[in-house]
Image: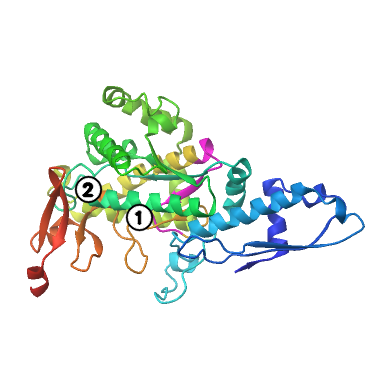
Amino acid sequence: MAVSETMLSSQFSRINLEPTKYPGVTVTEISAEVDDVSPDGIPPQGITTEVKETSHTRSMSSQFSTDVEHIRVSFTILNVLEKYGKHMTHKALSNTVVVDAESQPPAWSGKYKFLSNVHHHVRQGEPVQLTLPAFPCKSSNRANKVLGHLPDLGEELALELLQKMGTDVEKVYTPGAQVTIATDGVLFNDILGITDEDCWDYGEELKAIIAEKDLYTIRFRRCESLLGLKSEEDTTRETYLANTKMCRAELESRFGSSEEALTEHIKSDKDTNLTYCGMIKFLESEMETSPTLAGQSRATRMKVYRKLAKRMMQRSEAFTLAIRTLYPLHIRLSMHSSSGATKLSIPLIPTRDGNFQKSPWHSCVAVSLDGVYRCVHQDEVRDSHELVYRYGRPYFFRETSKAVRA
């Protein structure tokens, strides 16, 4: 789609690039063709400029050309990132229309919101910063959903996708991009009955995968590090286990909101309502084997799910606010469906048509005979697929020809 002069000029004030700083120059056309970046990474022509000469154009500042080039590069980077996104229209979010799977996917509505963020990094010649709150810990439902408490093929595939996104940016902008995984396990594990020890082990194994596969565009940060309580490098198992309660309390006191405020936000904001409904659905399967709910009626269980969903969302929203406050120039990524108005939603293990699947920490991977990765619950495939071990632990399921004949 073409970006008009008016649209681009409206971004000038946001990125400190005012046309009035170039006396004697009349900018008659600044347009950008926001085209797809080709698979080989060659950027589009991007922004083209046509400067109408006046009596003073021969003294046009070289800084003007530099700034316009920075904007062109910034748009190109946004184009690359957008290719990884998958968003829903507001009509789809409100369930008033069925989205045609064969139609063009909705554009990233928050794309121009992040122009100033990208431009800041480009102007400094530094990597574009992206932050993804994700990779908390494995599901507590290890009987039916996941293979254990450690990462497996699902996490490996998701990390490789994030690495590829960073290197794709590198193809059009030499400094590239850095993806910060802000792990949020400490926010939820106590609510779901998952031990702090399991969270630590999960994070350490993620870091081992990142190091072993040289996923150099990714860095891993725990909540303590993000809040400035202790650096990631200085965090040990002992200090982590000793500080989890303090970390949760610090997050809630600095960035938390009341349950009443959250309830109102659920009613008024479509993205928040979508997250809330998804959280309740998740808890139904997450806690189906919970001994504390055994024998309870569905009405009682749903009441518990709604309460826990709000509790988890309070911490999640606090974490989101912490990221936005402490890292205002980062591009916010999300692995949840959204309209894309305030973040870039990316399927970490996309289906063949680019849609979302279950998150890798709430599922396991089943590999089909034709090499397709499906994120499934283990009880869906354990009787029909072969369980494959790697690093001495269950790692994924593999479809067999026997399963196909059956």
In this rendering, the answer to whether 44 lies above or below 251 is below
Q: Could you say which is closer to the camera, residue 77 or residue 235?
A: 77
Image coordinates for residue 380, horizontal then vertical, percent: 15, 61
Image coordinates for residue 388, horizontal then vertical, percent: 13, 53
Residue type (three-letter) at the residue carrying disc 2? Asp
Image coordinates for residue 251, horizontal then vertical, percent: 42, 32
Q: Could you say which is closer to the camera, residue 60 or residue 7?
A: 60
Q: Which residue does the numbered mark 2 point to in the structure image?
A: 152
The crowding category of the residue bearing disc 2, from other C-alpha atoms within 10 Å (few below 14, some 14 to 19, many at least 20), is: many
Magenta segment: 324-338
Is 333 covered by the magenta stretch? Answer: yes
Q: Could you say which is closer to the camera, residue 362 or residue 91?
A: 362
Q: Residue 348: which numbered mark, if any?
A: 1
- Quarter containing the N terminus: bottom right
Q: How many marks?
A: 2
Instruction: Say whether residue 172 is left or right of residue 140.
Output: right
Residue at figure coordinates x 82%, y 49% from the top left: 22
In this rendering, the answer to whether 286 lies above or below 222 is below
Q: Could you say which is closer to the camera, residue 193 or residue 150?
A: 150
Q: Tell me the quarter of the picture where residue 8 sits.
A: bottom right
Q: Disc 1 to disc 2, how far (Cα)? A: 14 Å
In this rendering, the answer to whether 347 lies above or below 326 is below
Instruction: Say whether residue 134 is left or right of residue 177.
Output: left
- Quarter containing the C terminus: bottom left
Mark 1–mark 2 CB contact (< 8 Å): no
Q: Earlier in the sequence, mark 1 or mark 2?
A: 2
Q: Secondary structure at mark 1?
A: loop
Instruction: Say whether residue 73 is left or right of residue 203.
Output: right
In this rendering, the answer to whether 139 lies above or below 344 is above
Can residue 110 be seen at all in this image of the molecule?
no
Is 18 covered by the magenta stretch? Answer: no
Q: Residue furthest right?
A: 55
